[in-house]
Amino acid sequence: MCLHMEGDAQNDVQKSCSIPAYKRWCNHVLGHKINSNEDIDETVRSIKETIEREQNPPKIDLKDGWSPYAIKDCLEECGLRSDTYDLFFLEEWRAKAHFKFEGIGVLRNTIDFSVNGTKEMATQLVLKFSCWDPENLKADYEDFIFDCHILFTCAFGTSMPKALDEKLQCRSNFQDEHQGKDIKVVFDDFPDSPFKGSFEIMFGIENKDTQNPIF
């Protein structure tokens, strides 16, 4: 079972929810101990409230963050199809997507996208490129930079500044402010990695008061 509770009680929840909602409920309470029927009722109410917010998302002012239900799908045409925006840990909510490039080796370059925030709004947007296949780096990394440009435009409604594009191109650490948000580029070349040429770079846009800043 997906959590610590009696089978009959879990079956009752499954009957009261659609299959997608039931799967989300399992993830929502994963690792939590359910002590009473009231606890079960509360978790079901939480999932139903989440689905209602998805269907009627509140408007979010840019100074506060972004609507997670809109921003999480901004890279779908780039191959980054996000999962649902749900409770991840304690009060932190998250939607994420993963893309693996094609290649002939066992290890492939990848891009990960995450939208993090609170129940009501997204406060942090992160794109991460992981290089495990240096032979295909050039084309794959160009795709990543393109994705960064799309994310920036979706987040602010403007084009990415040239200085930020240059930092991404040369894979340099960078931090600046744009429209009240922190813009960050974080590069790690994995000096102790046994895989020659491997590295990771993160591009992030976040509120200054976000719960878990990139650095």
Image: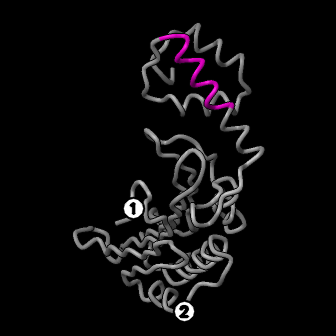
Give the residue displayed 70% in from the left and 58% down from the top: 70
Which of marks 2 and 1 precedes in the sequence?
Answer: 2
Furthest residue in direction left, as rendered:
192
Which amino acid, mark 1? Pro
- Kind of element beneath mark 2: helix
Residue 32, position as x, y percentages in the image: 43, 25
Give the residue displayed 77% in from the left and 44% down from the top: 55
Residue stretch rendered in magenta on the structure: 36-48
Give the residue displayed 45% in from the left and 13% down from the top: 35
Residue 159 against residue 21 in the figure, above or below: below
Residue 190, position as x, y percentages in the image: 29, 71
Colour basis? one colour
Residue 84, position as x, y percentages in the image: 64, 46
Is 197 left, or right, of 82 in this rendering? left
Which picture quadrant has residue 37? top right
Tell me the residue that label 2 is attached to: 162
